[in-house]
Each structure stands twice: as structure tokens, then as C-alpha cells.
Amino acid sequence: MLMRMMGSRILQAAPTLLGVATLVFLLLHLVPGDPVDALLGEMALATDREALRHAMHLDEPLAAQYIHFLGGLLSGNWGQSLMDGRPVLALILERLPATAELAGCSLVLALIFALPLGFWAARHTGRIQDMTAMSFSLFGISIPNFWLGPMLMLIFSVGLGWLPVSGMDQPGSIVLPAITLGTALAAVLSRMARSSWLEAMSTDAIRTGRAMGVSEHILWWRHAARLAAIPVVTMFALQMGAVLGGAVITETVFDWPGLGRLTIEAIQRRDYPLVQGCVLLIAVFYVLANLLADMLAMWLDPRQRKA
């Protein structure tokens, strides 16, 4: 039953992925500017411009260009970068490990802070501990990455000299970018953990256990924690896609050589095939993160398998 439900969700994700690819294709064709001008310049000879336009299939109808685009995606040929002529997919795969490292550290950091903070707030609900914890979470949600990153650089790099300012070559280079990217995620997860724990503690099962004399420690950490884990894990899976999208700003601030910085560089150079590939991959990660969240929710909560 579970495997059939998961297979159904995977099949449902296929049209979404096709829609994402179509939307990326159409949006980039609506962007003002000509990729031929970006590559050759406006003073290029007409014959050279037409030859390049033919090689890139830009002289064909939009429907034919779309067919070439989908065929390239399925075959692994995502086009060539306009600036250096290298395959788009190769450039993306070259930068992807740095982004994966940053996203992974940010997610781990968020979990380390969010779960204890959420439990602490739930355990002391309505008290000063709860208000303090939720104030910190509100602080984390409200501050944007493009402000938090430079502030951390000014304090810990320029002021104290403890950590590198940018790049990923020096020891400790990942600390400030991971904190910048993981702060908002930790804030969201801590609030979710608090509300989920409180909701779990108000269920009939917990009240029955308390009436039977089960200790509060066991109720909180064994029984309520299992119920509270379902929405927290689901939210964590959803935030995986958001972390990859937020890496665009964080990598630019800290000069981190990942996929986000590559996307900004491609936009600045008007490298349309590379922009198309980067945006498409980020969008695909969002879709896959939602699929992962659905599958985890079904695995953790048997009630959802009957939906």
C-alpha cells in the first residue's frame, strides 16, 4: 500500500516537472535582449549573426525551439554556455558540490538549534523561557540573508578577525555562510517544533498516559516526540528546496563558488542557456523537496496512506 502511494506521488510529480521546464523556457524567451547580441556584440557581421542564430535554433518557430529544448533536457544536452562554450550541464555539476556542502551544513546547523529551542519553548509554554525562545525565532525569520551576511562579516571577519571574509579555500570559510543560510530555517523549524509538541501533548493518548501514571519525561520524549516529528520532518523536507533557493543570495554575499553564484554570474553576462539550466535545476529541487515531504509524511503517519 505504501509503495503504491509513493509511486502514485512520483507519477504526479512528472507533469509538475514538465510544467516547470516549460515555464522556464517561456520566461527566458520573454526576457528582453538577444542572446546573439550578447555573444557576438551588436557590431558583428550579419552573416555571422545568422549562422549563430541558426546553430542555436533561434531562427525556428517557438514550438520547434521548445521541442529541441525538451529533447536536450532528456538527453543531457542542456546547451552550451554563450561565454565560454562549455556544456551547461558540466558547468552546473562543477558548482553543485559547493552548494550541496553549504546547504548540508546549514540544514544540520538548523536542526541542532531548532529542536532544543522548540522543545524548551514548548516545555515552558507561556513563561519567560517560551517568550525568549520565540523572540529569537522571530528575529531569525525577520532578518534577510542579504543583511545578516554582511553584519556577520563585519563582526567576525573585519572586527574580530576570527573567520575568513569570503571564498571557501580557508579553514572555517563555511561557518558564516552556513549561519546566514541556516538562521531562517532554524527559526521556522523551532516554531514548528514548539507548536507540534504542544499539539501532541494535548492529544487523548497523552492524557491517558498521564492518567495511568506515566512520567512526564517519557510522555514528552517518547510518545509526544513521535507525534510531533511528523510535521517537523515534513517542514524540514520542504525547506530543503528553500535552502537551495536562498543560497543564491548567500553565495553572492560570501563569494561562495556554488550554483547560486553561478546563476547570478550568468544573469549578469546574459548567458541565457546557463541561466535556463540553473533556474531549471533549482526549480526541480523545489519539486523534489515537496515530493520528499509527501513521502516522508506518508511513511511517518499511516493515516495519510488512506487519503
Image (tube, rainbow, N blue to C red):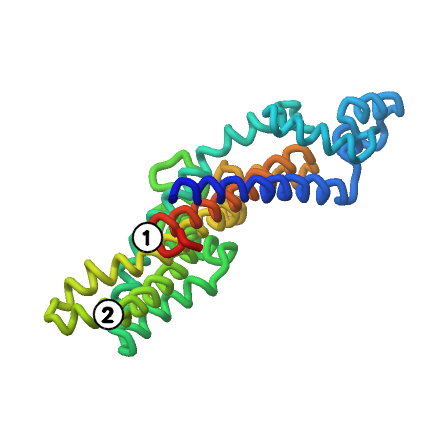
Instruction: Compare residues 243 and 231 and report the one nearer the observer.
Output: 231
Rendered image quadrant of residue 213: bottom left
Q: Position of residue 48 (x, y in %)?
A: 84, 22
Q: CA distance from mark 2 to mark 1?
A: 18 Å
Q: Residue at x 64, y 33 (%)?
A: 274
Circle 1 Cα neighbour tier, 10 Å, few/some/many (<14 / 14–19 / ≥20)? some
* Residue 168 % position (x, y): 42, 37
> Looking at this view, is 230 or 286 the one in front?
230
**Residue 261 visible, this angle:** no
Residue 205 lies, in percent from the top left, at 23, 67
In-image side of 38 versus 305 (left or right): right
For disc 1, the marked residue is 111
Which of labels 2 and 1 is toward the front?
A: 2
Q: SS class of the residue under badge 1?
A: helix
Q: Is residue 129 left or right of residue 278?
A: left
Circle 2 SS class = helix
- Residue 123 appears left or right of 67: left
Mark 1: amino acid: Leu
Quadrant in the picture for the N terminus: top left
Q: Closer to the camera, 154 or 147?
A: 147
Q: Quadrant of the C terminus?
A: bottom left
Q: Amino acid at mark 2?
A: Arg
Residue at position x 17%, y 68% from top?
209
Residue with the mark numbered 2: 123
In this view of the protein, can residue 160 be seen by the observer? yes
User: Which residue appears at 34% of the width and 37% of the height?
Assistant: 171
In the image, residue 263 above or below residue 81 = below
